[in-house]
Image (tube, rainbow, N blue to C red):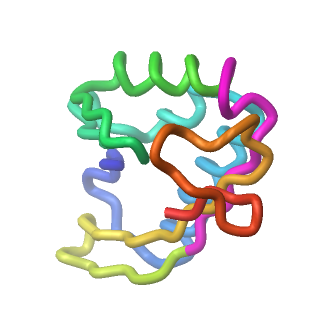
Amino acid sequence: MEHDVTGARLARPDIAALIAAEDDAWNRGDAQGFADKALPDVVFTNVIGMFSVGRAPFIAQHEHIFATIYRGSVLHQTIQHITLLSPDIAIVDTLCTVTGASHAPPGIELIDGAIRR
């Protein structure tokens, strides 16, 4: 997900705080909060390959999944690697684990009861 950090000097604690805020919003089922730092033209591909561009479809998709398949689920993202391209641009690779989903999305196999991507 792309985030608005224009003008910021990124540091690992700042990035970790942003990831933790995403986890918290997901775990509360808060699509608006989950998209809080997403750029207006966010590009998103979900675990089954659905693709969208823009905040509105990103929020709408998360509102839908938080009300259905992922209602009450828990997201935990673990930072695997950070590439700092400039003081205000970073590529952050995370391992995402979702537990508590009502069932696996089409084509996704649960590993130890979790969706891991």
Expressed as whole percent of the image width and height from the top left, the position of residue 27 reads: 75, 42
Left or right: where 16 falls relative to 80? right
Left or right: where 74 falls relative to 66? right
Give the residues drawn in magenta, as a range.
67-78
Q: Nearer the viewer, residue 92 or 65?
A: 65
- How many dots with numbers? 0
Left or right: where 86 falls relative to 31? left
76 w.r.t. 48: above or below: below
34 w.r.t. 16: above or below: above
User: Within the image, what quadrant is residue 37 found in?
Assistant: top left
**Residue depicted at x 37% and y 70%:** 92
Expressed as whole percent of the image width and height from the top left, the position of residue 30 reads: 66, 27
Q: Nearer the viewer, residue 7 or 82?
A: 82
Expressed as whole percent of the image width and height from the top left, the position of residue 82 reads: 37, 80
Asked if residue 14 lies in the magenta stretch, the reply is no
Q: Nearer the viewer, residue 41 or 109?
A: 109
Left or right: where 9 falls relative to 62? left
